[in-house]
Image: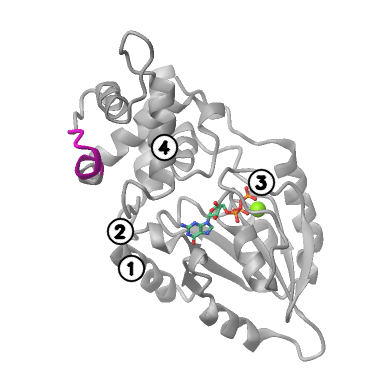
Amino acid sequence: MAGRTAWFPGHMAKGTRQLEDISKKLDVIVEVRDARAPELTASPVIKRLAGRKPVWIVMTKKDLADQDVTSQWLSFYKGKGREAWALDLLSRQIGPLRQAFSRCKPSYRELRVAVVGIPNVGKSALLNLLVGKKAAVVGGIPGVTRGVSWYKGGDYLVVDSPGILDPRSGAAVQKALAWLGCSKADVIGGYDTVACSLIDYLQRQNLWHFVEEKWGVPADPGDTVAVLEGIGRRLGCLVSGGNVDFTLAGRRFLESFSTGKVGRVSLETPLSRAADALAAEDDESLEDEE
Ligand SMILES: Nc1nc2c(ncn2[C@@H]2O[C@H](COP(=O)(O)OP(=O)(O)OP(=O)(O)O)[C@@H](O)[C@H]2O)c(=O)[nH]1
Ligand SMILES: [Mg+2]
């Protein structure tokens, strides 16, 4: 079962220090979050960087999120006086963000922007669109960018930064980040364990119908392992003797979910935060350990 060991490799601690060092030189910090869970995927380092610099929220992967829920988040942040956008970076449509940047650009030099956030939310993909070329490496696994680097292009000088997680977050939050591809399921508990936690969450949040419609696997709130077994059979994740390979089934389920193949599923709304549900789960498991 998952322990409380966080995935927090050395480049994350180093990246935090590097960002602190350069933050004084910036005009705007863009905090990149996943539109499917924008509070859960908030950056743990923003508070240490912000100071008097404006921090804009860019929710990426809008194409993978529930459209109505994304509209609710935009209204929510607007109501809090925050600058916020929801973008599908694969469509390359970032016109409104560019227009807002152009209003902040000093006349005598490029606008200095940093893209900051947890792993795999699309920081490097956004940077490439801003500078207008494939400057930074983009990849579908967390931990692709390892250091802080400046890139120049058009009217921008943009800092790419490694995805940085909170090493103190509880096991349930760490697992939830792995559902979205922002943490490593194999490191924080195993694909099958993390997949079962997602099955449990989707059932509890009345979101299981997406999976049932796609693969015809019914819910079973009392037995997430049986549900994963059903998914494994449906996806053909079998070992000799016809038994399900749970590790493979978990991995395939998580990959399908995080890349939107299960459907446009938002994990939280402004009125129903994932972190609240998950923190309660962490409290329960702590009590069990005591
Ligand atoms: N569907 C969809 N995929 C996106 C979007 N933005 C980024 N991606 C994908 O998300 C994955 C991660 O993108 P990156 O730009 O490498 O993310 P990152 O935040 O730089 O990740 P690290 O460097 O690992 O911290 C890639 O497979 C991108 O193609 C989006 O708006 N929609
Ligand atoms: Mg990157």
Q: Which residue is mark 1?
A: 72
On the question of residue 283 being in view, the answer is: no
Q: Residue 121 appears in which quarter of the rendering?
A: bottom right
Residue 86, image x, y percentages: 45, 69
Image quadrant in which the N terminus is located: top left
Mark 1 and mark 2: Cα distance apart in space: 9 Å
Label 4: element kind: helix
Residue 165, image x, y percentages: 60, 44
Camera-near label (1 vs 2) is 1
Please, is residue 101 above or below residue 209 in the view?
Answer: below
Residue 129, image x, y percentages: 62, 70
Mark earlier in primary sequence (1, 2): 1
Q: Which segment did they paint magenta?
A: 211-218
Residue at 29% across, 33% down? 200
Magenta residues: mostly which secondary structure?
helix
Label 1: element kind: helix
Question: Which numbered disc covers residue 271?
Answer: 2
Mark 3 and mark 2: Cα distance apart in space: 33 Å
Magenta-span inclusion, residue 289: no
- Can you tell me whether the CB of the residue at mark 3 lies under 8 Å from the nearest atom of ligand 1? yes
Camera-near label (4 vs 1) is 4
Disc 1 marks a residue whose amino acid type is: Gln
**Which coloring applies here?**
one colour
